[in-house]
Amino acid sequence: MACTEEVGREAEALRSQIERHNHLYYVEARPEISDYDFDRLLERLVRLEHEHPELRTPDSPTQRVGGAVTKEFPPVEHRRPMLSLSNTYSIREVEEFARRVERLLEAEGAEGRDMVAELKFDGVAVSLLYRDGILVRGATRGDGRKGDDITANLRTVATVPLRLREFDGAFREGEGREMEIRGEVFMQKEDFEALNETRPEEDRFANPRNATAGTLKLQDSREVARRRLRFVAYYLDGIRDADTPHFRRLGMLEEAGFFTGGHYRLCHGMQEVASFIAEWGEGRWKLPYETDGVVLKLDDVRQWRTLGATSKSPRWAIAYKYPAQQATTVLIDVVFQVGRLGTITPVAELEPVRLAGSTVSRSTLHNFDEMERLGVMKGDRVVVEKSGEVIPKVIRVVAKDRPPDARAVALPTLCPECGTPIVREEGEVGWYCPNEEGCPAQLKGRVLHFASRNAMDIQNLGESLVDQLVRLGLVRDPGDLYFLQEPQLLRLERMGPKSARNLLRALDESRKESFARLLFALGIRHVGQATARELAAAFPSMEALRLASLEELSEVPDIGPVIAQSIREWFMKPSVPALLEKLRDARLPLEAAPPKATLNRNFEGVTVVFTGTLRRHDRQSASELVLERGGRIASTVSRKTGLVVAGSEAGSKLEKALKLGLRVLGEDEFEAML
């Protein structure tokens, strides 16, 4: 289809609109349109660029969604070292830093002592390089001199502009118009909690920073895009006026389209610095993201050059770290919880105490070894800490305050829920209950996981209701949910006719969920939401997955031998055939949805394997094009492979295809065959 001037103008207008609404939503937190309307704009642009590939630009919003899997992250040498800051934990040490800077500057005859105070985001430091206003590279800090090129992952971050907004006279002349922006990639608290909900409990992240670091290491940028990372900018280099003060540079970053947090201040002396630190000591708990301190930098960048740096840290900046939030309270009791995988977790029940903006009455003790290390007893005064952790933890006992009637905590030898002797596997820290089928706590956990929002999304099926269903023997596995009748439900506590009908309606609605969601809902150890999607794509039916060998499973992206073994072991459990039979009788999706209607028969009977990076298609859209034309997709090359489509940086699959004498096409030939 020919691209008219009118189509080109529409695509440009759509790009401008989408980036504007993106900025309003993620940076300014004042959206003007609904998510639905935003998605419609993006879908229209995707369609135009698909029909007219020549319209697709490197800074198009469609390029944020992630593409092919990256095999490795090439090393990148930073233009200037990315140094880490020296930390301090007291105002007195900040004052000493200010005096030391004063002496050094006086010795050099320099003037001006103003400092910029900024909140210290608890994230992962990265560098962004822009050439002529377009993002061309993003890298991790690494060892400070060399980092990893993670451009594909950083392009998916909504608050990383793909094109800088114009701001007059900002670029230097004669340097290829390059700018470097440094900052921190982070995850907001609500996005972190939503991510953890999608993961098996044994694979959940401890805090947002760990989740961010783990996400940036992923080699599949599509999964990075799903995790809603954000970027805060705090450093700008490459502008025309090299003496522009740091405070002004932060304003320029905002003009260019970056999120800076907004909570920074130009301080004229230590009193104002101390006031900023005190103000945000409490105020930070109301923010939607984690901050762990304040960064102080001299405003006059000429003094940065004067003072220089040590081998590790600049002499013109320092980070004040807030002490970990702690509170002292009384440990009333220790209870032992049993998770859906049988893990026994000790939990301290505490006298309620205010900590880091919320009231804490329970705290994890992690495992039996940690309990013994702490030496906790019932009645002890304990110190509870919340520093970057979502769940507060007991860090020590106040031994001198131990009351005379303090009682030792008896460690269980039997499961507190079913009485089965608990076990610990060699080399593991945790104890667990091996009674997988008969332990009510494990069953309740599996049912709740099955019904959760990111699994089968069964509304109105809460913890108290599941507890009754299990206790009364109405539900022995998730499959039993679909055979509940209204008269049975009406016998339950606080269950009227309307509530019963709502639950049955929700169960019926859940039948429409995808095969991938069902795989996640089954609670196979180590199989999170992303892994379930990959499995559903590679093995489009429960039977195909059941018959898959360890080798075939390990060929699926992001699935190694541990996950592959876990899947095989799940299918070998005695209870699984009966569960799958119930789900089949309940008309749940034990197969992936049928492929889209066939457009033509150009790939009829041909098994296609993609390798390398295609310029005009991501792997998923290219696969759909083959399926719509009667072909099938495989992830591994074998003698049964009919065709290999090789993009740039094709590796071992291409080598194997050539050795086997298979037909290999480039992207242009592939499109011609379509």
Image (cartoon, grey):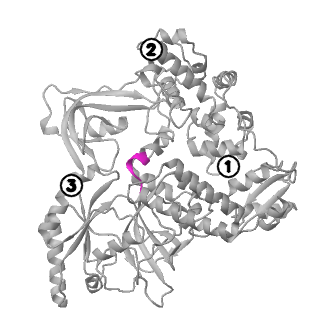
Q: Position of residue 259 (x, y in %)?
A: 38, 64
All told, the count of numbered labels is: 3
Marks 2 and 3, how far apart at CA: 46 Å
| Residue 244 or residue 297, whichever sits in front | 244
Helix, strand or loop at disc 2?
Answer: loop
Helix, strand or loop at disc 1?
Answer: loop
Say whether residue 48 is magenta: no
Say whether residue 187 is magenta: yes
Marks 3 and 1, how far apart at CA: 47 Å
Q: Earlier in the sequence, mark 2 or mark 1?
A: 2
Left of 593 or right of it: where is 115? left
Q: What's the residue type where badge 3 is placed?
A: Gly
Marks 2 and 1, how far apart at CA: 44 Å
Q: From the image, tell me which residue sits under label 2.
A: 495
Q: From the image, tell me which residue sits under label 3.
A: 281
Q: What's the residue type where badge 2 is placed?
A: Met
Q: Is residue 664 above or below residue 585?
A: below
Of tags 2 and 1, which is closer to the observer? 2
Quadrant for the C terminus, please: bottom right
Q: From the image, tell me which residue sits under label 1.
A: 556
Left of 62 or right of it: where is 546? right
Q: Is residue 131 above or below residue 567?
A: below
Asked if the residues shown at circle 2 and circle 3 are in contact, with their CB atoms under 8 angstroms apart, the answer is no
| Magenta highlight range | 186-192
Q: Residue at x 49, y 60 (%)?
A: 157
Q: Position of residue 576 (x, y in %)?
A: 65, 26
Helix, strand or loop at disc 3?
Answer: helix
Q: Earlier in the sequence, mark 2 or mark 3?
A: 3
Of tags 2 and 3, which is closer to the observer? 2
Q: What's the residue type where badge 1 is placed?
A: Val
Q: Position of residue 368 (x, y in %)?
A: 36, 34
Q: Residue at x 71, y 45 (%)?
A: 538
